[in-house]
């Protein structure tokens, strides 16, 4: 069953439309992440589901009930805010009990549910404290606890980790993933951080400029981005883009020449794209292979040793964007600044995008991807 | 205090000047009060004996006893009283009642209006708010005549209702002041409460007001002092002896005594009594306000 269904949902502020007709179904128990650059409408969409923003047009269903006309409190959703939004004058216990008290639950039920949630979130010893006497991570857990005690049909998170420092963010991310696994609850999570999206999501919704670019599992988006935007947004470090011209197709292999004349053969179904068409070649950093000679040649300008891998930033001709080419090399690579690297791309390693930025279909499976990586 | 400023405490010319100015302000503020106290403590008969001195010639508490109605009429007159029976305690009670009613009414209703202007969207809210702010420019005295006519027509002269009516419902300053603060309360808090099932009114009383203790205390002090010192309106509508507030009651000391001169010592004793509650309020609350301001700035 779908817990949340959006049909042609739009949002306009005055005459300016910021959300352009979203269709989406969130299945029961699913962890869905809305990801996209800042200002793309993630929060607006989430707040429309919560009922904090009106839906200009379209329909919303939550837990099988038409919800866009219901007040926020009756939509069976609980929300965790980026700012935590804890009531500063109330204790942790009172913060978590606030909604239950309003719902008219009995004292025993309230004490029971709050203490159980506090136990799960390791807050039991902090129940009498005020929020200002808590650390960032603890405040975050109280905010989550406040959502849990209400037993909502859907949890909504709006960038809940962005106020935490890096190490705490990783820790809380794991904690949220664990909570989801334990509770089997439906969760919708907003972030601009694609690493958070990749690590947490069952299903990622990539948003851009108020519309959906692609919906899919993390690996689906990673291996089969539908367009240049998703290809560039998902994955870290980013996918590299090179200008090229489609030469032709024989069997399963398409031949492309790069700006410097280097020919590449890629396992891609070019469909009706005619030879001679300008295309963009996308290659993830880990798909380049350093070869002794030939291939795409360029000078190394920066080398980063991360321990488990080495990244080289290479100046090659015909880059589709300003940024240098990023190449992942083995950890023990001896490549130095100033060296010339010769790079080849295996047939399963490349992506092709037509002039409009739409991806051409890759003829690869997850197995061949794994082999290529 | 733990968060001591980092700048040095050296005796720079600027600091000396600042201290000098502060001392001057202090003297200018305290001198009249000292004079009130000195006169209040002076026996009426010796009032003119040492008029050049800052300290009283002899001193007595008779004047206080007299204005508080603790002495019988013969003694009263002998000590220089007007003979008119002024019930200072009752006037104090009236003043207190007037002040408390005005403070509660003004703060509560200003807060509600301010919250509406800060958070609710309704047609014309900007215009209405603009009118409220503009009304601060209208001198209060201009409103006294129409208000007086209205209160008289309703038949509220010499009633508590008539006394508080023009002040109770709102103060444009209060609305302006609290709205600014309400705008600074994070919207997230109220949205979280909305999702928790709270109504607007519940949010206002259980979230917004508790978070606004400091500005509400500040506004209460300002309203309270203004109300306590209010003279002209009570003088217009509540002249009957049992309706007089302290400021009005003090007037009767100025009328001549049987001896022919105003009862200065009585006036000053009563005046000093009337200052006490405001002074106590300021001293006790000022500390709290300063602390809470320092706290919110230092976190
Ligand atoms: N109250 C508003 N009035 C007008 N435009 C708004 C309002 N709130 C948000 N927007 C616009 O809607 C777009 C999406 O905003 P938002 O959902 O907050 O983005 P995100 O959360 O993805 O960073 C932005 O371009 C923003 O300027
Ligand atoms: Mg946002």
Image: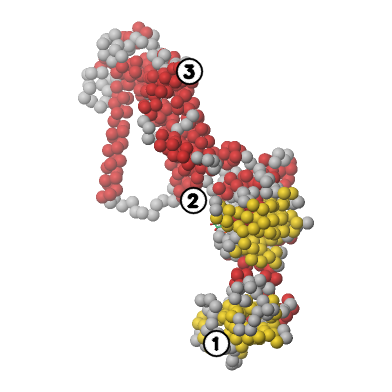
- In the image, residue B157 sits, relative to residue A32, either above or below, namely above
At a point 59% along the width and 37% down the height, the residue shown is B201
Q: Position of residue A283 (x, y in %)?
A: 62, 79
Chain bearing tag 2 is B
Foreground pick, B162 / B8 = B162
- In space, the residues marked 3 and 2 are separated at their CA atoms by 52 Å
Q: Position of residue B167 (x, y in %)?
A: 45, 27
Residue A274: mark in rendering: none
What's the coloring here? secondary structure
Q: Are marks 1 and 3 on the same chain?
A: no
- In space, the residues marked 1 and 3 are separated at their CA atoms by 95 Å
Q: Residue lying at the far right in this picture: please name it.
A: A1
At a point 48% along the width and 41% down the height, the residue shown is B126
Chain bearing tag 1 is A
Query: Given contact means CB atoms under 8 Å apart, are the residues at marks 3 and 2 in contact?
Result: no
Residue assigned mark 1:
A260
Residue assigned mark 2:
B299
- In space, the residues marked 1 and 2 are separated at their CA atoms by 59 Å
Q: Nearer the viewer, mark 1 or mark 2?
A: 1
Left or right: A79 with respect to B130? right
User: Neighbour class for label 2 at 10 Å: few (<14), some, many (≥20)?
Assistant: few
Q: Residue lying at the far top in this picture: please name it.
A: B74
Residue assigned mark 3:
B154
SS label for mark 2:
loop
Instruction: Mark 3 or mark 2: name the one nearer the start of the chain.
Output: 3
SS label for mark 3:
helix
């Amino acid at each position: 069953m779908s817990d949340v269904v959006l049909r042609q949902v739009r949002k306009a502020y005055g005459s300016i439309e910021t959300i352009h007709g979203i269709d989406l179904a969130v299945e029961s128990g699913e962890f869905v992440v809305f990801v996209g650059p800042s200002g793309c409408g993630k929060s607006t969409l989430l707040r429309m589901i919560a009922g904090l923003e009106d839906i200009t047009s379209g329909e919303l269903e939550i837990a099988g009930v038409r919800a866009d006309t219901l007040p926020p409190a009756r939509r069976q959703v609980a929300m965790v805010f980026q700012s935590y939004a804890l009531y500063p004058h109330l204790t942790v216990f009172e913060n978590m009990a606030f909604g239950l008290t309003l719902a008219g639950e009995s004292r025993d039920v309230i004490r029971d549910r709050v203490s159980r949630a506090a136990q799960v979130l390791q807050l039991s010893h902090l129940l009498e404290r005020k929020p200002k006497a808590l650390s960032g991570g603890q405040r975050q857990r109280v905010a989550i606890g406040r959502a849990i005690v209400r037993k909502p049909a859907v949890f909504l998170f709006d960038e809940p980790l962005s106020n935490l420092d890096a190490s705490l963010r990783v820790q809380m991310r794991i904690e949220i993933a664990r909570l989801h696994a334990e509770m089997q609850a439906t969760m919708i999570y907003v972030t601009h951080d694609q690493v958070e999206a990749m690590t947490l999501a069952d299903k990622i919704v990539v948003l851009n400029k108020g519309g959906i670019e692609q919906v899919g599992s993390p690996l689906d988006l990673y291996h089969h981005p539908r367009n240049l935007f998703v290809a560039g947004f998902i994955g870290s470090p980013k996918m590299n883009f090179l200008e090229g011209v489609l030469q032709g197709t024989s069997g399963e292999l398409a031949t492309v020449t790069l700006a410097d004349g280097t020919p590449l053969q890629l396992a891609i179904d070019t469909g009706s794209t005619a030879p001679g068409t300008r295309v963009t070649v996308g290659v993830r950093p880990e798909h380049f292979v350093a070869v002794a000679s030939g291939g795409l040649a360029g000078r190394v300008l920066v080398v980063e040793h991360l321990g488990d891998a080495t990244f080289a930033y290479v100046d090659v001709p015909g880059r589709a964007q300003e940024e240098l080419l990023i190449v992942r090399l083995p950890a023990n690579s001896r490549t130095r600044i100033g060296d010339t690297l010769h790079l080849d791309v295996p047939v399963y390693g490349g992506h092709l995008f037509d002039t409009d930025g739409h991806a051409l279909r890759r003829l690869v499976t997850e197995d061949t991807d794994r082999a290529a990586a | 205090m733990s968060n001591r400023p980092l700048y040095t405490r050296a005796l720079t010319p600027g600091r000396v000047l600042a201290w000098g100015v502060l001392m001057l302000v202090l003297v200018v503020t305290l001198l009249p009060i000292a004079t009130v106290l000195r006169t209040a403590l002076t026996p009426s008969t010796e009032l003119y004996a040492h008029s050049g001195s800052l300290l009283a010639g002899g001193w007595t508490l008779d004047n206080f006893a007299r204005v508080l109605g603790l002495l019988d009429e013969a003694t009263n007159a002998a000590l220089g009283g007007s003979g008119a029976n002024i019930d200072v305690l009752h006037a104090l009670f009236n003043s207190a009642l007037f002040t408390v009613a005005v403070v509660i009414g003004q703060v509560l209703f200003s807060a509600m209006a301010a919250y509406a202007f800060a958070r609710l969207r309704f047609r014309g809210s900007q215009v209405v708010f603009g009118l409220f702010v503009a009304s601060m420019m209208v001198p209060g005295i201009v409103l006294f005549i129409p208000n007086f006519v209205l209160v008289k027509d309703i038949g509220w002269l010499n009633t508590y209702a008539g006394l508080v009516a023009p002040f109770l419902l709102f103060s444009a300053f209060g609305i302006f002041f609290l709205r600014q603060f309400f705008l600074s309360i994070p919207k997230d808090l109220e949205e979280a409460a909305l999702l928790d099932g709270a109504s607007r009114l519940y949010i206002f009383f259980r979230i917004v007001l508790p978070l606004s203790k400091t500005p509400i205390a500040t506004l209460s002090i300002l309203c309270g002092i203004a109300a306590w010192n209010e003279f002209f309106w009570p003088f217009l509508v509540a002249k009957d002896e049992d309706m007089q507030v302290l400021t009005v009651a003090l007037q009767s000391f100025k009328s001549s005594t049987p001896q022919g001169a105003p009862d200065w010592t009585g006036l000053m004793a009563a005046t000093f009594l009337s200052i006490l509650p405001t002074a106590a309020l300021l001293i006790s609350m000022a500390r709290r306000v300063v602390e809470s301001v320092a706290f919110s700035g230092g976190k």
